[in-house]
Structures are given as C-alpha cells and as structure tokens.
Amino acid sequence: MLLLGFQPVLPVGTELPWAHDLHLDIRWPTVTLEEYQTFCTALAMSVVDEPDYDRFLHEIVTVEQTDDPGSPVEIIERLWPAVMSGELLFSRSGVRVRGGVQHVVAGVADRAPLENVFLRRYRATSDDSLGWGHNSQWKTDFRRDYRTATADHLNVDGEFDIDEASGFDPELTSAIRDVLRDRYASPEAAARTSERNDVFTSRYRMALPHNRGERSVH
C-alpha cells in the first residue's frame, strides 16, 4: 500500500483491473520516498540500490523500446527502492527501463498482470487472496523469495519443486519457470499454462544459481 504513491496511473484505454475496482478507491496513506526508506530501515531492513537490471530485485514499471533489438536492458529511473530483510526479499524496486526487443518487450514486461502481487496502480495483478472474501488478505500466505550466496530461491513455500515436477512437457515446465522468475507471463507462457486448468504456478518453487550476466526479459 505504501508503494502506490510512487506509481503511475493505468495507461489510457487499459481495461480496469478487478483489484482496482475492489481496492483502489480506498484512501491509502501517501508517504515520501524518504519516509518509506526510514520506515523500512527502522524495521531493521536494508534498502538495496543495484545499478544494473536484476530480475530478482527489479519490477519493470515502463519500457522504452530502443531501435536496436539487441540493446541490453538498462535502468533509466528508479521509482522506489528494493528492500531486503536479511536474505529475504521484502519488496522489489520499481524501475523504468530501456532495451531492445531481444531482451525486453514493451507492452508485455510492463503490462502483463503481475503474479503473487496484491495491488499496483499501473497494471493488473493476480494474487491468491483476490476474490475470496473481505478478510482473505489475512488468510493468504505471502510469497517468499530468498537470495543466498549461491542462488535465488523463489516461492520457497511452493508445494512442488518445478525441476522435479512430473507429468509436464518441457514447454510447460519452461513456462512455469518463466512465471516464477519474472512474476508475469509472456503471451507464450500464458498460452501454455492456460492449456492446463490444473496448473497453478503459485504451487511451485524454484532455485536459480546465480548468473549475474543474465539481463534479458520477455
């Protein structure tokens, strides 16, 4: 809720997300960036300022598409900081980026619904608590991601390890991995997971060994 004041509004012509209709008209508190950082550090959390785009730490708010399709992803503005509690990710940083279509696609990386996220002013979200009653936020577990010295551990409370899941073809496994990693589905991943109505990506966990050179997104 504290991040809403740092976010742009929905683009003109965008369909109103269900979460907006339910929750955005509430008078949520507005804080300054300094107040937000002070609040987080007072709770013994750390504010992370990573200059290079990092899927784990950064949430894409807008994409500026470059003419060169091979241009790597570059952060051009940070709207709010990433926050960690030890190795646990509390909140990703909201960033505006530019890059070529081989690495990041405008209209997808910044517009596809965010998974395991309750509310964003600038795009639709999908969260297990939405639509289950007025107090469902208190009964829904948070997604937990950890960054250790050797790997990023995503959605650690998932029932199944996606790399050990059986009964999935390689393309479906890859689609679930993409959603776990990026927190949104590319059109290809969305089409693949929608083919199976028994697939809920929130049920899976995944560990990614560190590869700091990887900067591409769908």
Image: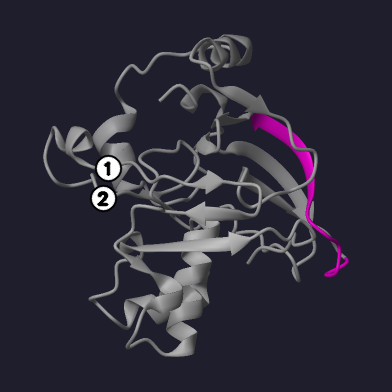
Q: Residue 183 colored magenta?
A: no
Q: Give, as a three-letter code, the residue at label 1.
A: Asp
- What kind of element bears circle 1? loop
Side (left or right) of 75 relative to 193: right
x 61%, y 37%: residue: 94
Q: Give the residue pinned by disc 1.
A: 141
Side (left or right) of 13 relative to 81: left
The N terminus is located in which quarter? top left
x 35%, y 40%: residue: 118
- Using the numbered discs, state the Cα–Cα distance from disc 2 to disc 1 in whole angstroms: 9 Å
Q: Please state the horizontal and vertical placement of residue 200, each as a whole percent of the image.
A: 30, 67
Report whether residue 185 is seen.
no
* Residue nearest the observer in this picture, 162 or 148: 148
Report whether residue 156 is seen.
yes
Q: Give the residue pinned by disc 2.
A: 128
Magenta highlight range: 68-80
The C terminus is located in which quarter? bottom right
**Is 100 located above or below residue 157 in the figure?**
below
Q: Please state the horizontal and vertical placement of residue 143, each as a whole percent of the image.
A: 38, 46
The answer to which quarter of the image holds residue 80 is top right
Counting residues from the start of the chain, the first of labels 2 and 1 encountered is 2
x 39%, y 48%: residue: 125
* Residue nearest the observer in this picture, 17 or 29: 29
Q: Give, as a three-letter code, the residue at label 2.
A: Asp
The answer to which quarter of the image holds residue 209 is bottom right
Say few, some or many: other residues with alpha carbon within 10 Å of mark 2 (under 14 / 14 to 19 / 20 or more). some
**Cβ atoms at labels 2 and 1 below 8 Å apart:** yes
Q: Please state the horizontal and vertical placement of residue 154, each as a whole percent of the image.
A: 48, 55
Closest to the camera, between mark 2 and mark 1, is 1
